[in-house]
Image: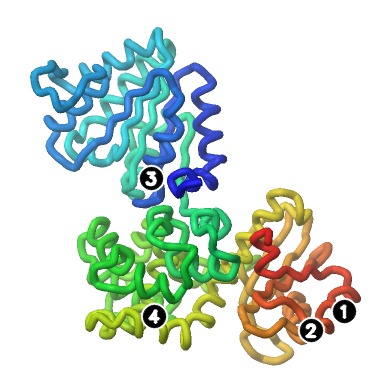
Amino acid sequence: MTKGEDVFVGRSQELTVLEDAYATGTFQMVVVYGRRRVGKSTLLRRFVADKPDVRFFQARETIAVENLRALSAVILGQDEADQTLPSYSTFEAALDNAFRYAESHRIVLVIDEYPYLAQSYPGISSLLQNLIDRRKGSSHMMLVLCGSSMSFMEHQVLGSKSPLYGRRTAQLKVKPFDAFDSAVMLAPADAVRSVELYSLVGGVPLYLEQLDGSKSTEWNLANRILGLSRYLYAEPENYLSQEVRTPALYNAVISSVARGCTRPVDIKNDTGLSSSAVAGYLKSLEELGVIERIAPVGDANRKHARYRICDQLFLAHFSLIARYAELVERGMERQAAERIVRRDLSTYVGHAFEDVSRQWLTRQMTSGDVPVLPLEVGRWWGTDPRRREMVDVDVAAVGLDGELVAGECKWEARPTGSDVLGTLANRAELVCGGVSRTLLFLFSKSGFTDECKAAALRRGNVRLVTVDEMFGL
């Protein structure tokens, strides 16, 4: 199986939504959006591959007349390169023709990179609103609006102030793969290497395609990630340059979070930016999927919330790789990679393993293998009044029927001992009161000691999970 085929392994739910919309035979307006490089266009081309009547228009960052010429060619089924062929004089004429044709034909009209079209012709949303309102009752069109500008799609297509508000029949936010779908693209990497590589680039398909799962993590660092000419090395800077106007200031905020400043007031003091500026940058970075706001599971107090870098490529770049920028600039990628693996990688991957464990637990609850209907899945932190110290629980979930799931993650070379289980059991009592039952999970890279296995058996509410088991090995 090629990587081009593998990319669809994790998109079955999205394809089901699209197929269900198509199967209605009635007018549908589906909004598909998500960050750049996440595979939206590939998903849509896979969806339309077996459809008999498709018009796939890729809008461009250009002037309106160029986009109109290209859209006209798509609707008329022409070769855009043939400049002698006629085109519509207005967007209204082009789209009205498509809607009239759809009165007697089931067609799929995809407008990819819709924000580019709206930028070149600001009236396009109002035009579509008018056509939809007039013709949807007799139309068999499936209209798909797709875009990478998260802010535009959420506010100017899906938002209540958009002319298109209320017209959508379905929406898809296409997200990066989790660690397990990423592992399929990283084959033949084993479970440990899959977690390591996922921790460095995350689940964006285009990023995963840069790696070679048959080679070691150190090799991938030296040959695919580090280096001034490497796509993945330059990508965080390039991504921000495409999405924001002042990337240097956004870089400052991200760097601050990477240094451990997780509250807005701490970021403000660390960067010297105003409170309002920090709030604005954090909001934009959340929309871009770079940073997320998290709170302890079961804790509604907003004062306890923190910010963290949730994009693994950004996290690796700002908290790990940036330390070796001078070596990379001198062409010493191999030496930098060796040092990262020897000194830093285990601790860094340990934090990513917590995310992987939460993803695994969510999958298990979704499939019913863990019989809990989760209201919330995340982590927990707070004060242990007995020890008078801050403690945390790596994995925490609260169930619909009052269950508590608590887990501890160990990414170490030695097997996990019974002392870790005892600590987890004590901390689980701090998470929230009034639970109907508690389930404890230990997640380990290197297995468990015999004493730990015996202690888990005695407690009866404990599950021990190795990384190999998580990845079905």
Q: What element does badge 1 sit on?
A: helix
Q: Can I make out residue 159 in this image?
A: no
Check disc 2 and give the amino acid type: Ser
Question: In terms of depth relative to the viewer, which is nearer, 160 or 205?
Answer: 205
Q: Residue at x 33, y 36 (%)?
A: 162
* Contact between labelled residues 4 and 2, with CB atoms less than 8 Å apart: no
Check disc 4 and give the amino acid type: Ala
The image position of residue 155, as x and y in percent, is: 35, 44
Choose the circle earlier in sequence order: 3 or 4. 3
Q: Can I make out residue 465 in this image?
A: yes
Q: Which residue is mark 3?
A: 154
The image position of residue 471, as x and y in percent, is: 64, 61
* Contact between labelled residues 1 and 2, with CB atoms less than 8 Å apart: yes
Q: Residue at x 37, y 13 (%)?
A: 102
Tell us which disc is closer to us: 2 or 4. Answer: 4
Quadrant housing residue 378: bottom right
Choose the circle earlier in sequence order: 2 or 1. 2
Mark 2 → mark 1, Cα distance in angstroms: 8 Å
